[in-house]
Image (spheres, grey):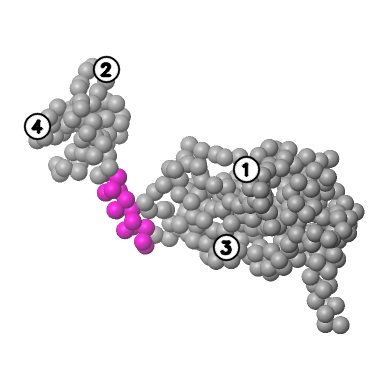
Amino acid sequence: MDRAAEMEIFVYAVEEGSFSAAARALRLSPSAVSKYISRLEDRLGARLLMRTTRQLSLTEEGRAFYERARTILTEIEEAEEVVTQLYAAPRGTLRINASVAFTKYQVVPLIPEFLNMYPDVRIELTLDDKFTDMVNDGYDLAIRLSELEDSSLIARKYAVNRRFIVASPDYLEKNGIPRKPQDLVHHNCLHLSSRESFNDWHFETPEGHMSFRAQGSFSANDGDALHAAVVAGLGMARLAEYLVHEDIRAGRLTPVLTDFIHDRAWISAVYPHKRHLSPKVRAFVDFLAEKFTPVPPWELGMRDARSFTRPREDAKPAQVDQKALNPEATAKGQKN
């Protein structure tokens, strides 16, 4: 028997906890497992396992050998896997856990195209804004809109998740445009009831970093509900660019305090740390990269939104420059 096979039997014995359990997993007899490990110990000139009638325990030499053997066997598996995957077509069930609003609006519309490209793949999608244990819950991939905290995961970054504080033109005409973050105390700031951290709006001011806790007459546990309330003129809210970009371009919403906006996070595909991805995961990760980079679709045509600045100091608080709110109307006026 070669050395790799001896290592495999030894690792199985350690991880299964007994010769009999290792024998069942390897389809060998317990006596054969015992013989191979004894031969390994004789060759190395060291006792690797302490044997009792109830359990196996590693010696100091055995622990050192186990850790190295486990690494070597993993590298052998990955070396074989990378060769086979070069020619393997994506297939099987792809289990994805993803952020609710972003996935509904930006990912789900793309899935038919992906499945047409890879007909042997089946997708199981779970929408959830709460963090999940990907490995224990059995997910192949997650789509996240926040910083990666788990170092055992890999993130493929696609785009910055920019957020705007927005309000309808009617609301701003009635209540004025906030010139600085401190002015928000005079406004109806709608907030999310399901995630308290989302309601801390962060700004960079000449005086340094500051945060504002959004409070108002309306809260909801769903971003779509906040979006609808803002468009209806109820107040202002901090919403993601991918959710409001069409409203800004059409003049239904206006971003404010854009000079002070600070909080940004990446939109990423996240997957467990593996040197070589399975074909189905790699195909989906690369597919999203093709769709979202170098410029994601919700940023196309958004240069107008980025050009919004604070009103001049001499502007009247309760008045809104309608030309600034609707760049398309301004362009028509210039042509006439």
Q: Quadrant of residue 248?
A: bottom right
Can see residue 78? yes
Distance between mark 3 and mark 4 Cα atoms: 57 Å
Distance between mark 4 and mark 1 Cα atoms: 54 Å
Q: Disc number at residue 128? A: 1
Count residues near mark 1 (Cα–Cα under 10 Å), then give few for <14, some for 14-19, many for 20+: some
Image height check: is 255 above or below 42?
A: below
Contact? badges 1 and 2 (CB < 8 Å)? no
**N-terminal label among 4 and 1:** 4
Instruction: Assign a secondary structure to mark 3.
Output: helix
Q: Identify the residue at image location x=86%, y=66%.
A: 322
Q: Identify the residue at image location x=81%, y=41%.
A: 216
Distance between mark 2 and mark 4 Cα atoms: 25 Å
Residue type beneath disc 4: Gly
Distance between mark 3 and mark 1 Cα atoms: 21 Å
Image height check: is 207 above or below 159?
A: above
Q: Identify the residue at image location x=29%, y=53%.
A: 79
Report the magenta residues as a range: 73-87
Q: Main secondary structure of the magenta part?
A: helix
**N-terminal label among 2 and 4:** 4
Residue receiving disc 4: 45
Residue receiving disc 2: 54
